[in-house]
Amino acid sequence: MTAPLLLPSVHFEVSKVMKARIRIYDQLPDHYKSYYVDGATIYYVDGPFGCYFTQEIRNEDWSVLWFQSFIKSSSFAIYPCASLPAVVFYCGIQGSLSGYLNGVGRLLLKEAQYSIFYMPKSVVSVKLFRGAYDGVFLSLSKPFLEGFASKYESLKDVYNSYLEEAIEGQLLKAHQLGSTAWTLLSEMRARVHKAPADRFFFLDNHIRELLFGYLTSSPTTLRNVSDPVMTVSAVYTEQVRKAAKYMEENYDRELTIPEIAKIINMGYSSFIQAFKKEYDLAPHQFLKKCRLQKALLLLEETNEKIISVSIAVGYNNPSHFIKVFTKYFGISPFSYRNKRKRNLEKG
């Protein structure tokens, strides 16, 4: 899948003097194969300072860029750049990045923390010292961010700068990577070896989980006009209620649970868990309940054929509808309608 140019691409450059002394490859050497990310575009740079490499997977909504460097000189300057102004979500796995961001001043991206910063097209400088560095840079598109920015006050200024393509950068507060974030980051690298369609779905869910976790990691990041301080639990409740309402209003469509999770900007696993906690039903069970209850009304109040009732409540396969209905109510749609008619005639 080729992403449009509207999604910024973060890359790393070296000084003009160093450019003449580096070698660039599109594969990893054997001794770094343990870092290999299946399906990613590789950019490996080797020089007198040591080496660094990036591996990127991207679609129209986001770019995931894994960054590793192994520095053997006492210090080395590297320049993260964006093809367009970018909102970057950085997760530091190993080593702290110290540099300068125009508009912010000193930029410190610490190990075991994650943060969001707006990076204008102008060059950002970062100094690396002897040692190993490992991190993940997530570039997020404007449509992708819009859904989150509408809910979280802390993200609105960064998002507005993105829309305006401001000259100066911005930096949101960093938070410690919790156990959930560590697990998500580990899975993103280790379990991404899937078919392309599944790979993008897998990464999309994990990115949403990470971003949601960051935005709910402190009460001060959850400010909006109607509710000055919201807890993580309250945010989950609000989101799953929106999902329930969406299912109640769109039961006649071919809905999928991953699609619903994406609409409300929640990761798949968080959505499943939060929904069960709120309704004592899994989302697919709730959707089935909505459809079958509507089917009952149609059988009672109309003379529509069973095939028409099936399609009207979101089941395009009438045989499957009959099977699901019979298992749920213990009676087939035909028998239910006939039994109700007999009861009405007796009454």
Image (cartoon, rainbow, N blue to C red):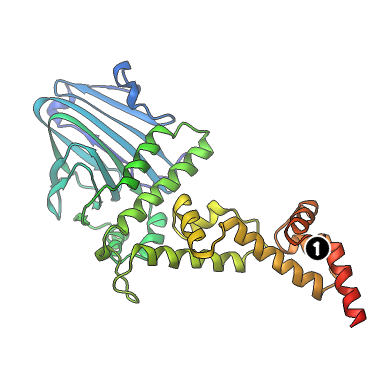
Closer-to-camera residue (121/228): 228
Drawn side of residue 77 relative to residue 138, left or right: left
At horizontal 31% and vertical 45% (from top left) the residue drawn is 179
Judged left or right of residue 172, residue 194 is: right
Question: Where is residue 10 drawn, in percent x and y?
Answer: 29, 41
- Mark 1 lies on a secondary structure that is helix
Q: Is residue 46 above or below residue 41?
A: above
Q: Is residue 267 above or below residue 298?
A: above
Location of mark 1 (residue): 308
Specify the farthest residue to the bottom: 347
Where residue 151 appears, as percent x and y from the top left, is: 37, 66
Q: Residue 96: x, y in percent?
A: 16, 40
Q: Quadrant of the C terminus?
A: bottom right
- On screen, residue 100 above or below 284: above
The residue sitting at 32% across, 42% down in the picture is 182
Camera-side residue of 52 and 23: 52
Disc 1 marks a residue whose amino acid type is Ser
